[in-house]
């Protein structure tokens, strides 16, 4: 059951993070295109990049292994970057009269899911470190969990690449032109 819980948290985080990071930040608000938001966009880009090694090193490694602890270091770095992001948002969103309440709540939910999922995996590592023997039932959904994590990697790489591209003028201008064509939402 623990793998189902970890999977649900990770999928919910990925879906909401995609909505927040791509739809809201890049398309709807175009944060990369506003001078006061460029630092916040750089922080979002760092988080998008960090999520790839978090998936590969933390979520896909054997809990308690050396690779796992390297991944845990990346998770801790991500927490530090979240704190920077939270500090920047007030000034960064001055062009839109501040961060909308709904997006503020979304950020709390998204990051809560992300770190709750990480806490589940850390708990598993702690139990293994204590010498707890896990039954076959414990591993019943582990393959599904691994499949989910592996399938999140390509999309996460694409989101990171999209964020990196918008740090540069030509791709950022191209995306801004495409944003202007969107007539809804």
Image: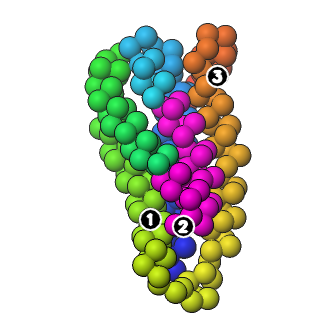
Percent across and percent down for residue 182 are: 61, 25
User: Mark 2 Cα within 10 Å, few/some/many (few <14, many 20+)?
Assistant: many
Asked where in the image residue 178 lies, by quadrant, the reply is top right
Is 123 located above or below residue 17 in the figure?
below
The residue singled out by tag 1 in the image is 122
Q: Are marks 1 and 2 in contact (CB under 8 Å)?
A: yes
How much space separates mark 1 and mark 3, taking CA atoms?
33 Å
Q: Is residue 2 visible?
A: yes
Which residue is depicted at the point 55% across and 44% down? 51
Q: Secondary structure at mark 1?
A: helix
* Precedes in sequence: disc 1 or disc 3: 1
User: Mark 1 Cα within 10 Å, few/some/many (few <14, many 20+)?
Assistant: some
Asked where in the image residue 66 lies, by quadrant, the reply is bottom right
Horizontal side of residue 27 vs 99, given as left or right: right
Horizontal side of residue 18 vs 29, given as left or right: right
The residue singled out by tag 2 in the image is 63
* Precedes in sequence: disc 2 or disc 3: 2
Residue 73 or residue 107, whichever sits in front: 73
Q: Where are the magenta residues, as a range?
A: 44-72
Please tell me whether mark 2 or mark 3 is closer to you in this view: 2
The residue singled out by tag 3 in the image is 165
Q: Secondary structure at mark 2?
A: loop
Which residue is depicted at the point 62% across and 74% down? 142
Determine the main secondary structure of the stretch shown in magenta. Answer: helix
User: Mark 3 Cα within 10 Å, few/some/many (few <14, many 20+)?
Assistant: some
* Precedes in sequence: disc 1 or disc 2: 2
Q: Are marks 1 and 3 in contact (CB under 8 Å)?
A: no
Asked where in the image residue 89 lies, by quadrant, the reply is top left
Q: Secondary structure at mark 3?
A: helix
Percent across and percent down for residue 71 are: 53, 52
Decide whether residue 56 is among the magenta residues: yes
How much space separates mark 1 and mark 2, taking CA atoms?
7 Å
């Amino acid at each position: 059951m623990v793998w189902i819980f970890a999977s649900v948290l990770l999928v919910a985080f990925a879906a909401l993070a995609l909505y927040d990071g791509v739809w809201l930040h890049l398309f709807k608000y175009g944060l990369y295109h506003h001078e006061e938001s460029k630092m916040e966009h750089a922080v979002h880009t760092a988080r998008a990049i960090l999520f790839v090694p978090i998936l590969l090193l933390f979520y896909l490694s054997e809990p308690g292994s050396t690779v796992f602890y390297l991944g845990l270091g990346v998770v801790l770095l991500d927490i530090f970057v979240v704190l920077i992001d939270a500090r920047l948002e007030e000034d960064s969103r001055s062009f839109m009269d501040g961060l909308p309440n709904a997006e503020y709540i979304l950020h709390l939910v998204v990051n809560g899911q992300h770190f709750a999922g990480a806490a589940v995996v850390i708990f598993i590592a702690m139990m293994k470190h204590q010498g707890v023997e896990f039954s076959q039932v414990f591993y019943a959904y582990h393959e599904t969990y691994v499949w989910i994590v592996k399938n999140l990697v390509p999309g996460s790489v694409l989101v990171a690449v999209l964020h990196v591209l918008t740090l540069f003028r030509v791709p950022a201008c191209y995306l801004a032109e495409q944003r202007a064509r969107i007539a809804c939402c």
